[in-house]
Image (tube, rainbow, N blue to C red):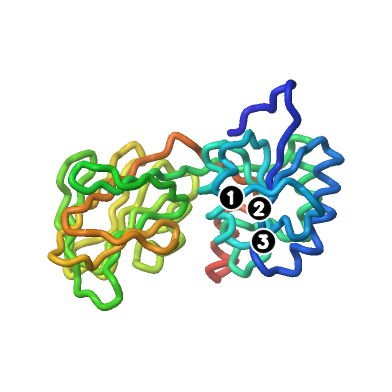
Amino acid sequence: MASSPSSSRSKVAAIISRPAREEVARTVPELLFWLHAHGYEVIVDPETAKYSNGQLEVQRSQMSSRPLDLVVVLGGDGTLLSAVRDTAATDAPLLGVNLGSLGFLTDVPLSSLFPMLDQIAQGRAPAEQRSLMQCELLREEKILGSYNAFNDVVVNKTALARLNNYDLFVDKSFVSSYRADGMIVATPTGSTAYSLSAGGPVLTPTVNAFVITPVAPHSLTHRPLVVPDSAVVEIVLRSDEEVAYLSLDGQPGVDLRDGDRVRCRRSEHKVRLFRTEADFFHVLRTKLKWGER
């Protein structure tokens, strides 16, 4: 949860927008007016800067270096995932406004943007706290990269490769060797993404757990596994060729080699999302077309 802004500085809001959406051009000037009227200094990403009439432009990757009190995301779930990764270190709450189609995470419609902002200003806006996952890529005990993932971490074969072997460890205890297309480690938020399409369970967003889902496993006895998010999950690639990659939240992958280890744990940061009043099961019924009573 974001801390209260210090009396020695102004509140700061960031606006992050999906590229090439005409709704952004129409919405940003009015949004800037509201934010300034409520005492916010505003920074914007390059997409928003096109319509912001001289607001301070900051690359998304640099936003976490600034003290933020609110992040407004104009786009779809992909834009929100990017915004979470880039601002997670600030612990600022996010308001995701849906300009896309599915909208699992950005469930606030554009028509509700300013009513939601008014609720935020009055301290009455409903919000959920979601877990974030930290992932490290290790090669021969050297950390090659450290990443944040809000949905999932995926170790997958390349398009033309055969099945790979993966060793799974939970809190350093060996679980099993998997021969499969890939392995997914998902947060509860990400349980409705790739993991779901691979046969994994749906977790309610506030469950303190990770779900580990093999992708097209060679053995029918290998099933998705739910573990507490206090655990450290490690996947070791066993392959004679460079035929796998690491992907986070569906972003372009990092090439892996035989023996590379992907280590996942709960991040020290949390993600706070402002939401509509709709409960999670209503979202499932609406977005996944589950039957009504």
Query: Quick one: SS at disc 2?
Result: loop
Crowdedness near tag 3: few (<14), some (14–19) or many (≥20) residues, C-alpha within 10 Å = many
Quarter-of-image position of residue 280: bottom right
In this view, the mark in front (3 or 1) = 1
Query: Quick one: SS at disc 3?
Result: strand
Q: Camera-side residue: 290 or 185?
A: 185
Which of pointers 3 and 1 lies earlier in the amino acid sequence? 1
Residue contact at pointers 1 and 2, CB within 8 angstroms: yes
What is the C-alpha distance between the residues marked 3 and 1? 19 Å
Q: Is residue 178 left or right of residue 81?
A: left
User: Residue 135, how many percent across, how many down?
Assistant: 35, 46
User: Residue 167, how many percent across, how many down?
Assistant: 17, 54
What is the C-alpha distance between the residues marked 1 and 2? 6 Å
* Residue 277 shows up from this direction: no
Say what amino acid the circle numbered 1 marks.
Arg
Q: Residue furthest top?
A: 8
Residue for point 57% across, 37% down:
65
Which residue is under mark 1? 60
Q: Camera-side residue: 59 or 174?
A: 59
- Where residue 45 is drawn, which disc sits there? 2
Quarter-of-image position of residue 268: top left
User: Residue 216, how many percent across, how many down?
Assistant: 26, 70
**Which quadrant does the C terminus fall into?**
bottom right
**Which quadrant does the N terminus fall into?**
top right
- Where residue 98 is drawn, which disc sits there? 3
Say what amino acid the circle numbered 2 marks.
Asp
